Amino acid sequence: MKERIVMIGANGQIGSELASALRHKFGAENVITSDIREPSTLKKDEIFEIINVLDKSALKSLFEKYKPTQVYLLAAMLSATAEKYPQKAWDLNINGLLNVLDLALELDIKKIFWPSSIAVFGPHSPKQNTDQYCVMDPVSIYGVSKLAGERLCEYYHHKYDLDIRSIRYPGIISWKTAPGGGTTDYAIDIFIEALKYRRYTCFLSAHTALPMLYMDDAVRGTIELMDAPAGQISIRSSYNLGGVSFTPAQIAEEIKKILPNFEMSYVDYDPRQAIADSWPASIDDAYANKDWGWEPKFDLASITEDMIANLKTNV
């Protein structure tokens, strides 16, 4: 059976690059992207629809029109932005998910992808090599909504046998798309500012270690998960996925190897620091490795080199 994919929230950081990879794999005519506003660029062979995931009747019409076999639900309000609008964040992140899950059952959509986040972990979760199964006590509304979403995904799988797959994304680094209001966004901003001004003021402290993933690895890992046979998927909440962990001080040192006159400074008392302090410093992704062969390819040095090489012509 030929796959047909509808992606909701396709204009975001992950969606724009994941959509491109899916078009390459399945053909542009079989990948329908959607969001609440038009994308900045759209090629003539690409199919796009305006949709609000909270409008269930419009969403049903979209699914009936294209009859997808897979839906990628990426529409979400991210951590830093969600703290400003907690009620809106909960509504979008949870009720949007419920709309898709209910319509998947009603319209017999075979496979759903929904991203979770390391934000599901909290101050009592292990900081180092955070396990797939451990205490999860998120302190941000983003993390609370993602943890609730994980439980919904697992519930719909066990009760209705819906094939839902998910990844707990760490911070995502990409040179192609702008950051979208997340606590880990400094790891993108720092490269742009380094090339423009040879300096950066970081909103996180120098030694705040956080797990990160280069976009190429994130896209590849997502497609590998969705391609894996259902019998190999043992986790229906969300898989831990690790790439590389580093601090602002460490990434600054890597940048200095290429841009020797780069200077780093730090802001005191930024509200994003408290969110970062509650998150893991590194992730144990052994289940992803065992179940579907996950392995990251990019480390901090190769991320830094690739970011600077590509941004030189785009900044």
Image (cartoon, rainbow, N blue to C red):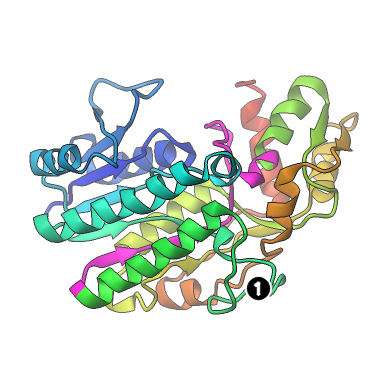
- 101 relative to 16 in the view: left or right: left
Query: Which of 289 and 10 lies nearest the eye of the viewer?
Result: 10
**Quadrant in which residue 257 is drawn:** top right
**Quadrant in which residue 166 is drawn:** bottom left
Residue 313 horizontal/vertical position (percent): 62, 21
Residue 130 horizontal/vertical position (percent): 64, 73
**Residue at horizontal 67 percent and vertical 61 percent from the top:** 279
- 263 relative to 97 in the view: left or right: right
Depicted 224 relative to depicted 272: above or below: below
Question: Helix, strand or loop at disc 1?
Answer: loop
Q: Amino acid at mark 1?
A: Ser
Query: Which of 49 and 27 lies nearest the eye of the viewer?
Result: 49
Label 1 Cα crowd, 10 Å radius (few <14 / some 14-19 / many 20+): some
Residue 261 horizontal/vertical position (percent): 90, 29
- 308 relative to 243 in the view: left or right: right
Which stretch appears magenta? 160-186
Question: What is the quadrant of the C terminus in the image?
Answer: top right
Report the label total: 1
Q: Is residue 170 magenta?
A: yes
User: Does any portion of residue 273 appear in the rendered image?
Assistant: yes
Depicted 300 relative to depicted 24: above or below: below
**Quadrant in which residue 162 is drawn:** bottom left
Question: What is the quadrant of the N terminus in the image?
Answer: bottom left
**Residue at horizontal 87 percent and vertical 31 percent from the top:** 262
Query: Which of 111 and 226 lies nearest the eye of the viewer?
Result: 111
Q: Is residue 112 magenta?
A: no
User: Does any portion of residue 296 appear in the rendered image?
Assistant: no
**Residue at horizontal 80 percent and vertical 21 percent from the top:** 197
Residue holding disc 1 = 125
Residue 84 horizontal/vertical position (percent): 58, 39
**Residue at horizontal 10 percent and vertical 55 percent from the top:** 107
